[in-house]
Amino acid sequence: MLQCLRQTVLRSNTLKNFIYKNEKLNRNIVDIYRFICTEKKQQCNFNLINSKSNNSINNNSSSGSNLSYSGLKSYYSTHVNSEDKKVTILDLKKKYQEGKPLTMVTAYDYCSGKEVDRAGIDMILVGDSLGMVMLGEKSTTSVTMDQVIHHSKAVIKGNKRAFVVGDMPFGSFEASPRDAVQNAIRLVKETQVDAIKLEGGKKHQDKIKAIVEAGIPVMGHIGLTPQSVSSFGGFKLQGKTAEEANKILEDALALQEAGCFAIVIEMVPHAVATSLTRMLKIPTIGIGAGNGTSGQVLVYHDMLGMYSDFLPKFVKQYANISKHIQEALSNFKQEVTSRSFPDSLHSFSMKENELNEYLTPLDNQKKIEKQQLLYENSEILKNTSKKSTVSTSIQEPNTTQSVSKPLDDNNTKLNNNIIENVKKQMNSKVLEDKKKKPKVVVIGAGAMGSFFSAKLAQNNLADLWMVSGWKEHVDHINKKGLILHNIGGETQEIRSIKATLDSLDVIKDGSYPDLALVLVKSNSTKQAALTAAKMISGNPNAVVLTLQNGIGNRESLESCIQEKGYKNVVWQGVTSNGAQVVSPGHVKHTGHGLTYLASPNLKLGVNSEMLQPKSKEEHQALEALSEILNQAGILTQLSYDVDSLVWGKVVVNAAINPLSAVLGVPNGYLVQNEYSKQMMKKIIVEGMDVCKAKGIRLPYGEDSEEGFKYVAQIAERTKANYSSMLQDVIRGQQTEIDSINGVIVEEGEKLDIPVQYNKMIMEMVLSCHKKNDHISLATCNK
Ligand SMILES: Nc1nc(=O)c2c([nH]1)NC[C@@H]1CN(c3ccc(C(=O)N[C@@H](CCC(=O)O)C(=O)O)cc3)CN21
Ligand SMILES: CC(C)C(=O)C(=O)O
């Protein structure tokens, strides 16, 4: 039989291929893996193998997984998958027959089960690896039926759709078919798993047959069977010799004959797994078995970077969650220690009269305490409505779609040295050598410029300069400091900032800034670019960062800097913090929000391991800057999709800002009034259509209802705020309309997409640019 199969393989001329490929694999397996991963999006038939197998990886990412964040709502909802129909054994069979790769990931509890399910993975394995990753054992042999059942129950509760396989632990089936059937039935009955898996080949054929006859689907497991670790002498590669490979092949055929619906093949050479996959009529699920199996499985904690005892060579870490956990925990520790957590947003208030009544009897003894408590209570009360802002603002950008596409070298115009130096500077100056703070110049001292300056200077993180044309503000900052009114109500007086009307003051001592942060209104970008160019002219390592609203600012800065002959990088970000300059020298933080940083050179690369060296260095520099901002208390994350970020914000701004400006109303009004709500919707639909036509993936997806919900939430969250555009109109200043609705109109017209609502509102705002004499802030405040 075996001989016959081997002949067939030989005839089909693939053995030569395997041998050739095996050598290649030996030579440079890392490169090949990289190839597999990076080409995943393309029609990848694993060209190196030139496989005709219908099980080769193709480009069908049909898992239906949409890991991009579409708001916390979807995170908390139990269902986000479009395909939320339960996966059955027939679906698996069909996928296999169509040559589509099957995906399986382990899960051991409610949350991990929910995550794997949400991601659209076909199968969840409640593996006995739980003994190691959940319980800290050194092997899986001690795992009991009770433990597998305990964990499977939790996974089943988190899962809606995936096909769940429960693992039969060591000792639960080996002795006799009777034991095997009893335990398999118990596992299914007590947990509702869809199938069971058991380790071992030919010798367990009788048990498998008996379980299958009892009506329970069985997944086999051959190659490295960890329950037999002791007889293997460690978790080692199996099937290395022709003899061993033959044995594995025999086992596979025996399992198929016994009625298994699929077989896990663990830690065997690629060629062995691929060849037996082709000989079988049932799918193989590989782990450390190369790319020729019908599917792949990995351990959840391994692939997410949450298990640190060992990392088998076959594991690719798609994330480093452990790092995030450590960061979060140490932030918590720091905030509790410094008493900055919980703040008013995370505390509860009571009605003032009740508090008064409660405190009055105590009043005589502790008058001061009473006043203090009343004040604190009122601050919490004020912020209660904003609570959702903060807790919903920690969302992952679209980074989990880990295509890990290495960046095209030509894509990065960056000089290696520059990046290296930026990295060194950022790291050494800020993170290690606290004495040598980076010099930061903030260009533009409006609400955002002042807020960022205050935050960066407050913890003495930077030697901070502000360049602004507003004399009273500059004078106040220099004479009495910049006063930051925090959300919690407390004020800080920041004395260390140097403000100037003349940017040359910043560099007159011969030292040039390391970072020029541009935060002027879009219509002043050209002028700010000239200033930025001057500021960096003596420092080839300096970085320019814009966090402005609207489209085109980064490009405009970059072209000005390049025209002047400088090669400095220009990064871009968006921020959803709210701030307002309440009077010269006084800036008020009005809303928490995330800040995202991105470089146009860093696209799609998520796993920094996969980035080209140049990009990797830029990535590290960007991370260093993000860290500085986080240290400054500005919650910051990196993003890998600049367009998604800036267009995502432009559509929001396009709907809120001009309407509030023209109507003279605070943001909240827009969602309370039926007419303005409808106008917002129309503006959003047009904006989203333009993005769709441009191939931009918006952070809130492409459904306009979702888009509207997203914008409406922002308007609601910032309901008391007067948009910056309204403030501009009232002050008789130019607004940013051109780089917001203006770009939607421009791009829409280019692409033949209707944009008449954006055009209309834009023209209305443009007519306000002149006609503002009759409006005053007082009128507006009524
Ligand atoms: N977290 C986790 N991940 C797993 O993949 C896994 C478990 N646990 N527990 C059950 C088994 C054990 N597995 C393992 C464990 C260790 C190696 C390992 O360290 N392999 C080395 C080679 C060791 C050798 O050849 O001596 C490697 O570099 O891959 C491999 C598979 C796979 N399974
Ligand atoms: C590694 C996988 C296949 C497994 O058997 C387990 O998680 O127990």
Image: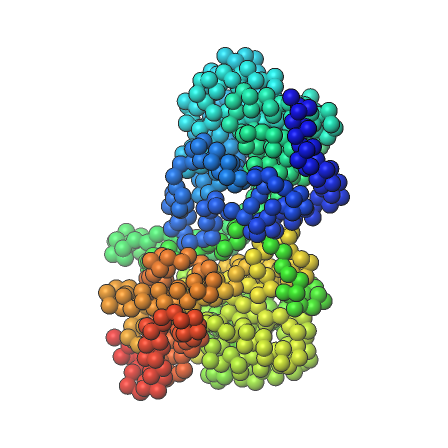
Q: Residue furthest front?
A: 11
In this view, 48 is above or below 673: above
Q: Is residue 158 left or right of residue 136?
A: left
The residue nearer to you, when weighing 89 against 676, is: 89
Residue 690 on image: x %, y %: 41, 67
Q: Is residue 418 left or right of residue 766?
A: right
Q: Is residue 555 left or right of residue 486?
A: right
Find ligand 1 in the image and state its quadrant.
top right
Q: Residue at x 44, y 28 (%)?
A: 193
The residue nearer to you, when weighing 48 against 477, is: 48
Q: Is residue 337 visible?
A: no
Q: Is residue 194 visible?
A: yes
In this view, 536 is above or below 408: below
Residue 233 on image: x %, y %: 71, 25
Residue 311 on image: x %, y %: 65, 39
In this view, 359 is above or below 188: below
The residue nearer to you, when weighing 259 against 593, is: 259
Q: Residue at x 38, y 44 (%)?
A: 79
Q: Residue at x 41, y 37 (%)?
A: 161
Which quadrant would the C terminus be assigned to in this image? Answer: bottom left
Q: Residue at x 39, y 64 (%)?
A: 688
Number of numbered labels in the structure image: 0
- Quarter of the view holding residue 699: bottom left
The residue nearer to you, when weighing 281 against 586, is: 281
- Quarter of the view holding residue 173: top right
Which quadrant would the N terminus be assigned to in this image? Answer: top right
Residue 475 on image: x %, y %: 50, 82
- Quarter of the view holding residue 241: top right
